[in-house]
Image: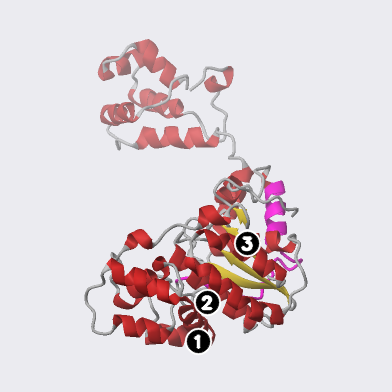
Amino acid sequence: MPENNMSEAYDYEVPLPGMYIQNELDARGWSQRDLAFILGIEETALNKIVKGKTGISLEMSRALGNAFGVDDDLFANLQKTYDLAHTPAADPSIAKRASLQSDYPVREMIRRGWVINAEVNALEKQLNRFFQKGDNDNVRQIRHAARKTNYGEAPTPHQEAWLYRVVQIASQMKAKPYNEGLLHDAKAKIKRLMQEAWTVQQVPKILADCGVRFLIVEGLPKEKIDAVCIWLDPDTPVIAMSLRYDRIDNFWFVLWHEIHHVLNRDGRDESAWIIDVELEKSLTEEMKEKVGKQETRANESAGENCTPRHELFSFLSGRSFFPERDIVLVAKKLKIHPGILVGQVQNKTKRWELLRKHLVRVREYLMPTATVDGWGHVVPVTL
């Protein structure tokens, strides 16, 4: 405890612990020298404790308790009460920052450059703009259909933050007016890109020519959204992906899933929250009931576009062994990358170890042509 003249005064609302020591001495007719002898310490050391120049340690509290025949922790508690009473109040912004961090993944959003670290009130204003809060303090819901993993639950703060980041970036992207007919016609052109990994780089432009805004936003920790179809308005669709699984099979399955949502106008005329699907696993009947026809049909469409159902079942029929040569030959026949077929085979057989070398990464091919936020890249937007 620092030395100052105030420490010698006993007129605080919470008095010095040393005052209680002195009261015990007076009650027994002891001097400080007597107590120092009993405790086995120097009288000057005891005098500093009595005057509040030295705090009472746990060890000294026990010693004083034994000397006076009181509880061991009595003087330690007196010291704690005194210290708290004379310690400046905590910065009120601490509690507010804690509240913000409980509501949003603020620290991660700052790290990603989505908001700027600032004084807490300024930070709160940024977050309100980020989440498009209205006067009633409600977050505006977004028309969308999405793929994530925890069925039936409300979106987590991390998922909401990712979704609103998508909206911010997409809102400021330039794109042609959406033409549903062009998107229907573009499906054949997109299918021809499935034979090689590098050709995924052509997807953003094809979609943009149809009026569909396509972007990639790296997921936040604990957030399991794979992709989302968002409608900025009834005539402006957006497809955003997180590339949570950076694999060719996952990319194509998710892309076809979201294209189906756009063409089916899923989420366009409603404000429904997120519907979950685990990409690594096929849907059980129970899951199908929870996600509804909308998601089930999108999954079926995605699977059919990746590997036609009859071709897949024909290849799987009666097999327990899948030679790499057969995978390559069938993929060539279907005009798809072997990794896409491997992904479908894994999904149906639950043998996730099969031929994983064909599940090549695609993000490196998308980075030069797609709007990408994450992995060290920050898309500049105005909140």
Please report the residue visible at 54 percent of the width from the left and 68 percent of the height from the top: 193
Tell me, yes or no, whether the two marked residues, 1 and 2, touch with CB atoms within 8 Å.
Answer: yes
As measured in the structure, the alpha-carbon distance from the residue carrying label 1 to the one carrying label 2 is 9 Å
As measured in the structure, the alpha-carbon distance from the residue carrying label 2 to the one carrying label 3 is 20 Å
Please report the residue visible at 26 percent of the width from the left and 18 percent of the height from the top: 38
On the image, numbered disc 2 is attached to which residue?
275
Q: Which SS class for mark 2?
A: loop
Disc 2 crowd, CA 10 A, few/some/many (<14, 14-19, 20+) = many
Residue type at the position of mark 3: Leu
Mark 1 or mark 2: name the one nearer the start of the chain.
Answer: 2
Residue 365 point in image, percent of width and height: 54, 55
Disc 1 crowd, CA 10 A, few/some/many (<14, 14-19, 20+) = few
Q: Which SS class for mark 1?
A: helix
Residue positioned most to the left: 320
Front one among 356 and 15: 356
Mark 2 or mark 3: name the one nearer the start of the chain.
Answer: 3
Which of the two discs, 1 and 3, sits closer to the camera?
A: 3
Q: Which residues are magenta?
A: 121-149
Residue 137 point in image, percent of width and height: 70, 65
Identify the mark at residue 108; answer none if there is no mark.
none
Front one among 200 and 96: 200
On the image, numbered disc 3 is attached to which residue?
215
As measured in the structure, the alpha-carbon distance from the residue carrying label 1 to the one carrying label 3 is 26 Å
Residue 241 point in image, percent of width and height: 56, 64
Which of the two discs, 2 and 3, sits closer to the camera?
A: 3
Front one among 34 and 116: 116
The reply to whether residue 172 is in sight is yes
